[in-house]
Amino acid sequence: MTRPRLSATVRRRWAHEWGSTADTVLVAAVSGCLAATSYSVLRYRRARTAVAQHVAIDRALAETTERYRALFDFHPDGIFSLSLEGRFTSANEASERLSGYSQDELVGMAFRDLLPDDQLEVVSRSFEDVVARRSRHLEASIVHRDGHRVDLSLTGLPIIVDDEIVGVFGIAEDITARLQMQREVEEARAVAEQANEAKSLFLATMSHEVRTPLTSVIAASEMLDDTGLDETQRKLTDVLHRSGTRALRLVEDILDFSRVEAGKTRLEPVTFDPAAVLDETFAPALEAGRARGLVVEASYGELPPLVVGDPGRLAQVVTNLLENAVKFTDAGRVRLSAHAKQTDAGADLHVEVSDTGIGMTDEQVRLVFEPFQQADSSITRRYGGTGLGLAICRQLVALMDGSFEVESTPDRGTTFAVRLPLGVPD
């Protein structure tokens, strides 16, 4: 007699006593034979199979998908995908904001429909490159639905499934504000450069027009000194000569500063004797210092007999430092010292000018290198000057790839140290 067989499969979540859960499958089989009106259960079998791992994987996959969907929807940059024909197949909310079209409107639209005419070629070429499995990054513009242009930083990546490209993945970052700021900065720079050019031209023209008659006035005063003047007349010609010389120096400083500031100063490297150049610059300072009752001295360490550099600019820097030292020292001494150190490229010339003058605070040291600035206004009233000398010196030293250092103490004096890299003749 055949005995009928009944079976059932039940999936159930079980709670363990330690709080975790497990998903299992319960398989039950019942077999028996019919005897009168009742069944006799002959056999019962229960099978319990754990499937927790499979369910956990499904759940993790769903959670991961949800997270990536949220990242896609709420990312601040436009994220989209395109078919191989260049039509949108998906787009996030940021893409709506950038284009002005809803997600539903974008899907099916060709990306070329968003491009202005001047962007079609370059963006289309980049799209074809991505379709050819080459990632691309470029900056381009689209036309918003309301008509204004939106500047974007675009990244395109191929979508590859089973080694076959099925579409293009894109990211669009709005860079409109950044590019607008760059344009404004460039425009401001262009305006500043034009203003600087106009200023330099004005200064050069005016300086030339002033320098020519000043030179004549100075020459005339020198000639008058040789005509047998009495004491009163000689004092007047001395005043005329000093005032003319001071005005001429001002004009020369303004010219130098405008050239350096405009980047038009050119070095003229030649072979020269550094000791001879230093001696030439020291002689006027020695005379001026002695006239003020100062001790003015020079001391040279080891110097090469010949170097290659711009002796005129070296003399200009050292002369300015010596003149300042003499001018701002009422009593004591002014000292010029120099030595050279051999380098792989030639020699570094180290020049120091020190004095026992009025000195400066740290804040005043910072100010004296600014154009038309001196330590404070009282110095300008007492000693005169334009405040251009040290600004010019610092720019010239930088032009010669050198360095400039200052140490100063109020009422005790100042030391300016200059290092200039020089070549050595073959």
Image (cartoon, grey):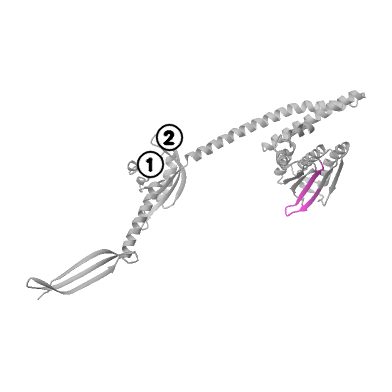
Q: Residue at x 69, y 34 (%)?
A: 258
Which-is-in-front pick, marks 2 and 1? Answer: 1
Q: Which residue lies at the image location 43% right of the left edge and 43% below the top edge?
A: 123
Residue 101, image quadrant: top left
The image position of residue 377, as x and y in percent, is: 74, 33
Q: Secondary structure at mark 1?
A: helix
* Mark-to-mark CA distance, 2 and 1: 15 Å
Q: What residue sits right under mark 2 in the picture?
A: 148
Magenta stretch?
338-356
| Image height of 47 relative to 407, above or below | below
> In the current view of this chain or complex, which residue is farthest to the front?
17
Residue 127, percent from left and from top: 41, 47
Q: Nearer the viewer, residue 67 or 285?
A: 67
Residue drawn at (35%, 54%) of the image: 65
Report the side of 137 relative to 420 (left or right).
left
| Front residue (pair 366, 339) | 366
Q: Is residue 339 above or below residue 143?
A: below
One can see residue 8 in this view = yes
Q: Residue furthest left?
A: 36
In the rendering, which numbered label is found on residue 96? Answer: 1
Question: Residue 394: where, in percent of width, then height?
Answer: 72, 41
Q: Is residue 16 magenta?
A: no
**Amino acid tagged 1:** Glu
- 383 left or right of 25 in image: right
Q: Are marks 2 and 1 in contact (CB under 8 Å)?
A: no
Q: Nearer the viewer, residue 211 or 106?
A: 106
> At 61% across and 34% down in the image, what residue appears?
193
Q: Is residue 153 left or right of residue 263?
A: left
Q: Which is the main secondary structure of the residues drawn in magenta?
A: strand
